[in-house]
Image: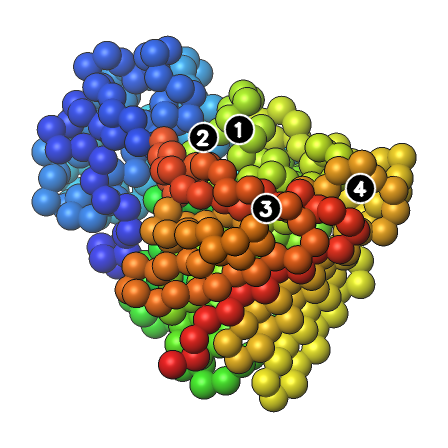
Amino acid sequence: MDCWSGARYLKSSTEDGEAFEFLGQSGDLREGWNNPAYSKLWLYNLHYQDDLNAIAADKRLTLSLQLVDSWVAANPPFQGNGWEPYCISLRVVNWVKWLSRLKPQEVNREWVQSLASQTDALDQQIEHHILANHLFANAKALVFAGAFFGGQQGEYWLCKGLKLLDQEVAEQFLDDGAHYELSPMYHAILLWDLADLICLQRCSELPVLQQRVAEWRQRFALGLQWLQRMVHPDQDLSFFNDATLGIAPALNDIKSYAEHLDLDFPIDTAINKLDGRLLAASGYAVIDWTKNHRLIADVACVGPDYQPGHGHADTLSCELSLFGQRVLVNSGISQYGDDAERHKQRSTAAHNTLEVDGNNSSEVWAGFRVARRARPLGVDMQQGDEHVVLNAAHDGYRRLKGKVIHQRQWLAELSSLTVTDELTGRFKDAVAYWHFHPDIKLVRLGETCCELSLPQGQVVRLDITGAHVEVCESTWHPGFGKSISNQKLVLNLTGDKLITQIEWSSD
């Protein structure tokens, strides 16, 4: 399977075989593969062994051999984090790719036996209880192992994995191309998984894969089109639900993989007019202007009703880039777990939307749980020659005594964006938030007016009607382990209607 070379996006996480850096934290392998001093997620990344297929991995063969030998020696069956099913799934695929590039005389029989034991362990603990991207990863690993081993055992794993994939591909990819967890980050990961499966078919030429590759290619093309609409002009991900940078492959990496596999995918065309698109199946909306302006709005459900674990209380939030620069940003994520910071990053207040009586629009709790959740209402987009209007509402606050409904309208014109929020029902306090990218300099011109200076010298004016305005310090999280100071506006509504007008020069 020599076509794996060139089809990898991850950078090496180690230089000397002992020092690793994941999620913004450095660690040392000499302290063991399961050192409790490190977080579980950090140890998971260690056990994935992504480095075997990272950029320039083939130039580090001796190091790769040492890492695999070390893992086998230090991780006997069913002991440690590495034997948990999601870890096994990612490592099995990495080992199959890596072993398939080695010369036969370079392959140690002990590695192959370990790979079989790992696949057998995975087969006994498929994550039906977690579903979503975990179950997809389980199925993918069984298919890779089955194709690698062949024979009766390999055929069993291959058939079991394909049966799961047949179900999950149809269920997890929506009609507009989105992955159903509605996270741009996990969507990019699943697109890479689809590309890997297409690559496996091309390398192995197995008939059972050939029967499915047309659908995989179609899902991939639709998914890539969706992702192209959900990135900013800088070509990196927008931050809705669990999403940040440095975890999933970037859009350009996925495009490169597609080119490597001779896959058809939509080509971005220059924006020559004000244009809006409603991605109805997933529930996002995108408005594009000329000069690299883009608005991305969340008018979606939190996620699948039975698996909203990566969802945030971000209904009706939005992100905005002007002149290619991110201006309005959701706060992103810097960690998983179940602590105050995780709760804060999933909260309504961490997003560009509106909070009622101190409540989140959806009841996010623990690390990956959602109770009562907001559902979108009345989503509609209308377009004229020089304007786009997006309307939406949600019922997340209807559970409160005042039965509040939040309505939001985005009116995009040639050189402005006006966001109007209205609340119906009874409430004591309502607060809206606008979070700004760290590179944006905010200067207050008056009680309800601000000037935003962009890094390339452009100036944007922001006027507020219907609220007392506070400028506050905040943090933005563009990666795991990263927390960057930024500013936000906290708008305490004086009534039931708030208008935010953003204007810029069209020159």
Give the mark nearer the N terminus: 2 vs 4.
2
Instruction: Classify mark 2: helix, strand or loop.
Output: loop
Q: How many marks?
A: 4
Report crowding for label 2: few under 14, some 14 to 19, many 20 or more residues within 10 A (C-alpha): many
* Distance from Cα at disc 2 to Cα at disc 3: 30 Å
Q: Taking 285 as reference, is 155 above or below it?
A: above
- Identify residue type, mark 4: Tyr
Residue 452 in the image: state x and y as whole percent: 42, 58
- Identify residue type, mark 3: Val
- Identify residue type, mark 2: Gln
* Distance from Cα at disc 2 to Cα at disc 4: 27 Å
Give the mark nearer the N terminus: 1 vs 2.
2
Report crowding for label 3: few under 14, some 14 to 19, many 20 or more residues within 10 A (C-alpha): many
The quadrant of the picture occupied by the C terminus is bottom left
Q: Which residue is mark 2?
A: 335
Q: Which circle marks residue 397 in the picture?
A: 4
Foreground residue among 395 and 327: 327
Would residue 278 be seen by someone viewing this image from the given angle?
A: no
Give the mark nearer the N terminus: 3 vs 1.
1
Give the image quarter of residue 232.
Answer: bottom left
Q: Taking 113 as reference, is 361 above or below it?
A: below
Q: Which residue is mark 3?
A: 469
Q: Which residue is mark 1?
A: 342
Q: Nearer the viewer, mark 2 or mark 4?
A: 4
Q: Taking 148 as reference, is 294 above or below it?
A: below
Residue, x 41% and y 42% (percent of image)? 486
Q: Taking 119 as reference, is 478 above or below it?
A: below
Residue 142 in the image: state x and y as whole percent: 48, 41
Which residue is most to the front?
446
